[in-house]
Amino acid sequence: MGEFDLIERFFKRPAPKTDSAHAANSPPWVGIGDDCAVLPLRPHTQLAVSSDMLVEGTHFFPNTNPRRLGHKALAVNLSDLAACGARPLAFTLALSLPEVSEHWLSDFSSGLFELADAHHCPLIGGDTTRGPLNLCITVLGELDVVNGKAQTLLRSGAQVGDDIYVSGQLGDARWALMVLQGQLGLPAALGEPHLGPPTQDSLLFAAAQLRLEQPTPRVALGLALRGIAHAAIDVSDGLVGDLHHLLQASSAQLKPQELLGASLNTEAALGLMAAAHALPQDLALSCVLSGGDDYELLFTAPPSARAAVQAAAVSSHTPVTSIGTVEATPGLRLLDAQGQALGGADKFKSFDHFSSQLA
Ligand code: ADP
Ligand code: MG
């Protein structure tokens, strides 16, 4: 199968209709098949653009289920749109393939389009070439501009006293990765999956593996948080590292020398990991704090917005948990459920980012 047959068969679909999301009288889209894709932009909007590349061996195992891989390649990109409060518009796919496997392509494109359809986000172009397996997606999103002001969530708006929130679950993806990499033992029942009914451990692991391989981009929550959250980022590198990025960007808006810090309630954070109770506490905490691959939204909002944050969580069908506070003292303080400093915090390697400032 040649490049063009491959595109035709697995990636080209009818051009999206100019539907209610776009002005009814705008010109039609140009999708796959011409030199450029062309899409109309609505007035009073800005374009949000983000790219993420997944490389075999670096970002996923060689034998990863292609359907899940198709989902994840798009999900990690949609997660960036979510963190900005952008509405997905369309995406492109640059694909490097070592060989043409129809079975693989069929599963990959099914996983990809299932998520794309759920977000009304059509594939409008890309590139296909032979080479090591490598998937690069660029997403385009739409940001509303109201009264000359873009309704964009940025990393840079956090203020002293803000509550720190995170959506969904944290840490399970890292646990699954450690097991799949052989760094940790498999839950006992997993070695023999066909013997008897699944155990609690094997179910926990299967769910964690899904978190790793098929993350849920929190697009609806990002949209619902516009005008409520002061700052937002998606958790791709780990809670502590990404919180550090958010605080750094926010500090840069303050007077020189002013640096924001934070305290985190480790009890609340541990509650976000489904498998936490099945693991030693230090291991669970390091998965939650320094894991990665979570693709949840981490955001801050003032205490006066607590009811609005809960309403956004409800309207977007996304759980949201308050896990800490933005403070005027630089550094990160880990607290136990009673608000006391947690001992031994510096043993988590993720704290590299904060290490020079650990309180
Ligand atoms: P060009 O050489 O002009 O860049 P190509 O021959 O690479 O165009 O691609 C032909 C058409 O197919 C273009 O519209 C391109 O956007 C689209 N395309 C190529 N690869 C993909 C892909 N993996 N997914 C979606 N569209 C693709
Ligand atoms: Mg080309």
Image: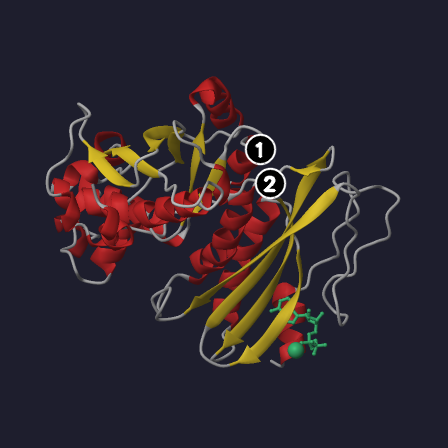
- How are the residues colored? secondary structure
Residue type at tag 1: Arg
Kind of residue indicated by mark 2: Thr
Return the residue at label 1: 226
Which quadrant would the N terminus be assigned to in this image? bottom right
| Image-based side of 237 in relation to 255, left or right | left
Q: What is the x, y in percent for residue 132?
A: 45, 79
Residue 330 falls in image quadrant: top left
Q: For ligand 1, tell me if the residue under mark 2 lies within 8 Å.
A: no
Q: Residue at x 77, y 55 (%)?
A: 39
Quadrant of picture, ligand 1: bottom right
In the rendered view, tell whether residue 297 sits above or below residue 227: below
Do residues under tags 1 and 2 come within 8 Å of each other at their CB atoms? yes
Compare marks 1 and 2 and give the one earlier in the sequence: 2
Q: Is residue 327 visible?
A: yes
Crowding near the residue tagged with mark 1, few <14, some 14–19, many ≥20 C-alpha atoms within 10 Å? many
Q: Residue at x 63, y 68 (%)?
A: 126
Residue 152 — which label? 2
Examine the rendering and report whether any part of residue 175 can be seen. no
Dividing the image into 4 quarters, which one contains the C terminus? top left
* Residue 349 image-quadrant placement: bottom left
In this view, the residue farthest toward the front is: 256
Q: Percent position (x, y) of residue 286?
A: 21, 47
Q: Residue at x 34, y 34 (%)?
A: 328
Give the side of residue 332 with respect to residue 42, left or right.
left
Residue 239 drawn at (x, y percent): 33, 45
- Pick the front one: 191 or 309: 309
The secondary element bearing badge 1 is classed as loop
- Percent position (x, y) of residue 343? 10, 38
> Residue 359 vs residue 260: left or right?
left
What is the C-alpha distance between the residues marked 1 and 2? 7 Å
